[in-house]
Structures are given as C-alpha cells and as structure tokens.
Image (tube, rainbow, N blue to C red):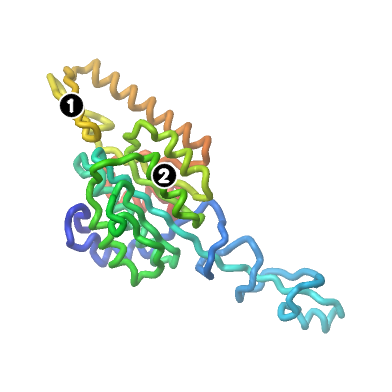
Amino acid sequence: MAEAHGTETPLFDSQFLRQLERLAILSRQMVAGQMQGERRSPKRGQSVEFTDFRPYSLGDDFRRIDWNAYARLEKFFIKLFVEEEDITVHLLLDTSQSMNWGSPNKLGYSIQAAAALGYIALVGLDRTTATALGQQNPGLKHFSPHRGKNQAHKFFSFLQSIHPASTFSLKNEMLAYRASSKQPGPLLLFTDLFDPNWKEALTILAGNTYDITLMHILSLDEVDPDFNGDLKLLDSETNNEIEITADYDLIQKYKATFAEWQAEIDLYCSKRGIHYIPLVTALPLQELLFSLLRRHSVLK
C-alpha cells in the first residue's frame, strides 16, 4: 500500500484493491434511489425479480397483470417485484489545520480511509461523492457523484489534491453541505472535532436524510500524550500559545478530561442517530477496513 498524503504515487497497489472489491458499504436506512442500482429495496417496483402479487385495483398498469393467474382463477392479479435501488455514499473530510498533525498524519490517514471506502462504493455501483471541507477552490473541494470502477482514478486524483485549509468552520461547512447535497444515503464524516461549534455542526448534519457515521480521527499523542517538562503549546487553528509544565498529575487530568469529552460526543451522537466511531491513526488501515468497520456494520 502506498502513502496517501502529498504524493502522486498510487494510493493502493492492485492486490489491496482486489481485497477491497470483496467488501460493500452498508446502509442502516433503505432509501429510494434515482437509478436502478445493486441494492434491494423494501418497496415494490418493476425490476425483473418477482416477489408477490395482489388483486387488481382500478388504475393499475394492465402490463403487470398476471394472465396465468387469471386463467386459473378468473380474477385479475398484479405482479409485484423487488425494486433494485442505489444509494449515494457521501465522504466528508475535515481539512482544518488541526488535521494536519500526528504520525501518521490525521489528514493523510483520513484520505487513505476515504479512498478505500470510496473505491468500495464505486465498485459496488453506488453513486459516490467526496467533499474536502474547508477548501476554497471549488475544483478542489467537491468530487461530484460518480459510479463504477472506471471512475476510481479520477476519485483518487481528487483526494490526492487535498491540502490543509487556511481557514475553517465546521458549522459553516455543514450548513453549506446540507444546502447543496440532497441525496440520502450513508455519510461518513472524517474529523477530529477540534472546533468549538462541533455540536451545532453535527446537529445541522443530523437534520437531513443521511445515514451518518462520525469517524473521530485522532493521533496517538492526542489520546495518550507522552510529554514531560516545561513546554510551549501552539494552537494550530488560532496560533495562540500556552506554556505548561507536563508532569504525571497534569497528564492524568488531561486523559480524564479527554475521556469525558469523547463520552460526551458519543452521547450527543447517539441521541441524534449518528454512529460514532473513535479512531486513532495508529490503527493499520487493513484492520480499520477488514475488522473495525465490519464490527460497526459500516462494511460487510
């Protein structure tokens, strides 16, 4: 597998792509698509797979009458079929300055994860769209809905063009996305939530017809810092500085506060139907895709 962030080399090798092709995006909501896709819908339509029949009612399409049933029963019955449906998979990446941090880099990790998930969706013939939240250039901000494996190169190229944004407001980005993208379907948001208005942002997103999974991207040194001594910390978003003395008591207090924050996020998400997945970039991508996301029913 190749490195993702800041390079034009292939994101993945062919062997890894073949492994991804065995996976599929799951949606916890069954939504009506605009085209005939690969998914089974609970509503009855006009695809080729017969599922049931019902008595004829005035106004029904005569072409759907089961004439064999009429010959046997001398009553009109309408054939019902399973309608195939497709979905739109939405991939949203926070490109704020705080995401350009850590080893592995949080933004680079998000790009690789989004690339893999988008490839799975494209191969599954789902409409797939990606948005680099915070990018000012419209051409670098949004990958319009595409479908099919042959769109993968264009999709990967878009992701590889992403760079950290100079200014960022998660709330404003969610307002803009909700206004511009109406298609229901699975939405995966990659963000560290280091934004003072994260609650308002999630509420805005949850007020739509998306099936939302929040991928809370964090570096290991944010979750379990290994610092000591006198330090000067710089806020990458505001450039504000703070001087601290990192000792055992301070680190323990930090960890407790951090755990409380994640518990607050989890509760806030659960009340709004958002699937919350805390994720540390130290987790290998293979384990994320073939284990963690399958356990969380994001992939199958």
Question: In the rendered image of this protein, does residue 106 appear above or below residue 37?
Answer: above
Q: Is residue 3 visible?
A: yes
The local crowd at label 2, few if under 14, some if 14 to 19, many if 20 or more residues have their Cα within 10 Å, is: many
Q: Which residue is mark 2?
A: 174
**From the viewer's perspective, is 67 left or right of 141?**
right
Q: Secondary structure at mark 1?
A: strand
Could you say where residue 55 lies in the image, as x and y percent from the top left?
81, 70
Could you say where residue 119 lies in the image, as x and y percent from the top left?
35, 62
Q: Earlier in the sequence, mark 1 or mark 2?
A: 2
Nearest the viewer among 183 and 40 is 183
The numbered mark at residue 233 is 1
The numbered mark at residue 197 is none
Q: Residue at x 39, y 70 (%)?
A: 148
Question: In the rendered image of this protein, does residue 35 appear above or below residue 68?
Answer: above
**From the viewer's perspective, is 72 left or right of 27?**
right
Q: Residue at x 56, y 68 (%)?
A: 84
